[in-house]
Amino acid sequence: MIKLGEPRRLGVPAPEARLRFEAEQREARGGPGRRLLVVDGEPTFELSFWCGTCPLLFRRLETARQKLSLESVQERLTGALADPDDGGVIDAFRTLLPEGEYLPVLLRVEPRLVVPGQEGDYFSGEQVATWGLDQFWGLPEYPHTPYYRTFETAVDASAHLYEFVVPMVPPAWNARERVEEYVELMGRGTVPTAVAVSTLDVCEPAVGLPADHYQHWGLTHFLLDGHHKLEAAATAGSPVQLLSLLALGEGLAESEDCARLPALRTQPRSARATGI
């Protein structure tokens, strides 16, 4: 972690926000349906279910087709920021977000691109070790998108933090020439900055499941800007800055859990051993 800002109120009324968090309503019983991340009125990602005992989830939906980059700050984000409030970046992106409390955190990450079902996939590795396979499908959860893993560490003896950066569209949709430009810049020592809206979900399986039982803290960064930068960093093995706007009221975590994140994010990286 580079710098931590103060929690603050950001965003615009939900109907005016390009990005918002929503809950589907079940017509028959009226209870909450899926948790969704919505962009331009279209469901974009299905998120971890409300109960907190279901597995962690960020599942890309068929209508996820939009990036949220802003031309007005592109030049400022080509290099590193010294502080979350540097260059007016937060003020620029606040107009995209639904009104709420956010914690700005400026991170330095070294992303590793992961393809679901392949080496390093959280959903077929650590998650299966704790929850097992889906009882209906007999398969791991499937996020329907490649994603980046960046950091993980122990929270305590019974909990572990996993950090993910999730692109709004697959890396295969990125312009090759833009990725190559950033690879070249990083080779000359430039550390560009990406921007994300983030959630913290704390999930733990129900008692009685055969499992490597512990809490999974999922810190998930949904990219607003920086799709080419993240792919370039993963390709070049280089660091990139990430300005995270953590939505404090939108994850499956208590306020005290969110308050622990800055200290956890400064701990040494550690991997959890599993039976997989």
Image (cartoon, rainbow, N blue to C red):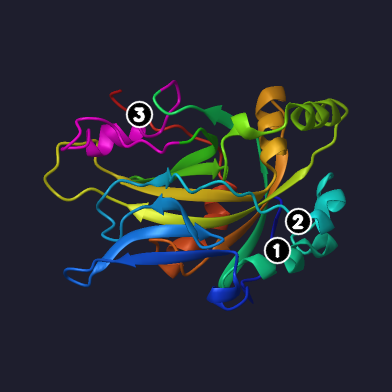
Q: Answer with the quarter of the image where residue 256 lies.
A: bottom left
> What amino acid type should be assigned to the residue bearing mark 3?
Gly
Q: Position of residue 149 (x, y in %)?
A: 53, 35
Q: Magenta residues?
A: 118-144
Residue depicted at 49% across the width and 58% down the height = 42
Q: Is residue 129 magenta?
A: yes
Tell me, yes or no, whether the two marked residues, 2 and 1, touch with CB atoms within 8 Å.
yes
Q: Is residue 60 magenta?
A: no
Q: Earlier in the sequence, mark 3 or mark 2?
A: 2
Observer-nearest residue: 140 or 18?
18
Residue depicted at 56% across the width and 44% down the height = 267
> What amino acid type should be assigned to the residue bearing mark 2?
Leu
Q: Distance of mark 2 from mark 1, alpha carbons?
A: 8 Å
Q: Position of residue 180 (x, y in %)?
A: 78, 26
Q: Distance of mark 3 from mark 1, alpha carbons?
A: 34 Å
Residue 93 is tagged as 1
For the residue carrying disc 1, how many other residues have a C-alpha within 10 Å: few (<14), some (14-19), or many (20+)? Answer: many
Residue depicted at 75% across the width and 56% down the height = 70
> What amino acid type should be assigned to the residue bearing mark 1?
Phe
Residue 125 is tagged as 3
